[in-house]
Amino acid sequence: MSDEPKKSARAWLYGLLPIAVLGILCCAIVKLGDRKDLLPTKVPPIEELSIQRIIIKPHGFQIEVMNDGPDELTVAQVSIEEAYWNFTMEPADKTLGHLEHGVITIVNYHWVEGEAYVIGIISRNGITWDAEIPIALETPVASSKNTWFFIILGVIIGVIPVALGLLWLPVLPYLSDKYLRFLSALTVGLLIFLGLDTMKEGFEFTEELAGSYNGEILLLGVGLLVFIGLMTLKNAGKEMVLDDGGRSLALRVSCLIALGIGLHNLGEGLVVGSAFIHGDVSMGTRLVLGFTLHNITEGLAIVVPLAACTAGISRIIGLGLLAGLPTIAGTLIGGFSFSQLWAVIFFGMAAGAIFQVVWIISKGPSLRSSDGGMALPENFIGIFA
């Protein structure tokens, strides 16, 4: 018996050995890929510049950039509407290494509000990248007025609609099992829609993300890690479920639903905040209206698992805040420091959390009849509604 742990450990070591060797081989390939002196012919430098963010100031522009190529990149000139313009840059030598960030500052340029501008960034080797400004509006700074504007946006989009959806809880105990299964299936359908919508928006942001980040892999990887992490937490907490008629299980499922919806609403806030700072007020208004009408169903999704048990008002308020408050954080981040990288990460987290909740509900009793079957008309109608 004493030899069994040693044999098990040895088996794990043998199993991990090929993976370790493969990892070393991949690192060597990446390192050798940067050694151009090993190539039989001389190749020109590969230059890729990623425009991270454009900040519009009262008398000029500030452009945050990143070297997305494997070679050093030196910025030589900057043009605005094809006219060369003086600029300063950090770092001072205007040279960026691989994945190094820099800030280009253009001063004493009197732009016209509402006009479109194209800023050309030209490297020492003559390669040009365009930083486009579709509508010139001064980038908001973190003042009390602007902060309250984005906070109110988040409350309108996320907090109020979710709270209105929670008000359906007193009605649920009076519904029959058939209608409760329908609402549970409706919740699953809503979560599947939210998950797919989250992935769609995440993939849209990967198109704008620097290629070195491998946006698609990052999005899927973050989602998978969150899914596995939440499943691990769920399994670790099984022993905490008391014999109280399923109350603890119902509360945990509602909490996970609220968490997944909250992460999704964080992404919605990012999109809305970004639309307003880029001057697309009409798009921002449409997003606010659409998200507000849509998010009222999220409150219902949170309280459906609680239909067969009692929950204190403080728990209900806590669930609503867990789902709604991240919207405020999203509008603030989107309004003051929007980043495609963080948008991809947040949307990946949201997708993983949402699909984990779908998995839990589909494996639970809320969609099953008394004989354990799931192929019921109310389930199909609810999911596809």
Image (tube, rainbow, N blue to C red):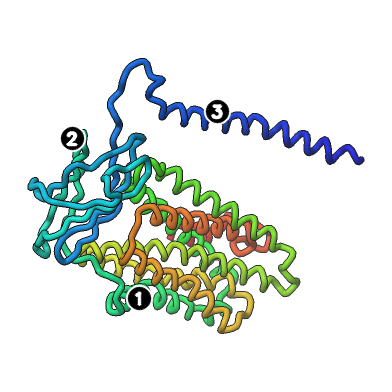
Badge 1 marks a residue whose secondary structure is helix
Q: CA distance from mark 1 to mark 3?
A: 49 Å
- The percent coordinates of residue 116 (x first, y second) are 12, 56
- The percent coordinates of residue 55 (x first, y second) are 24, 60
- The percent coordinates of residue 261 (x first, y second) are 47, 65
Identify residue for label 1. 151
Count neighbours of disc 1 (C-alpha within 10 A) and say few if under 14, some if 14 to 19, many if 20 or more.
many
From the image, state whether disc 1 or disc 2 is nearer to you. Answer: 2
Is 197 positioned to the left or the right of 48 in the image? Answer: right
Q: Residue at x 28, y 52 (%)?
A: 90
The mark nearer the N terminus, 1 or 2, is 2
Q: Residue at x 41, y 65 (%)?
A: 265
Identify residue for label 3. 25
Is 354 positioned to the left or the right of 4 in the image? Answer: left
Q: Answer with the quarter of the image where residue 365 lies.
A: bottom right
- Name the residue type under label 2: Gly
Identify residue for label 2. 126
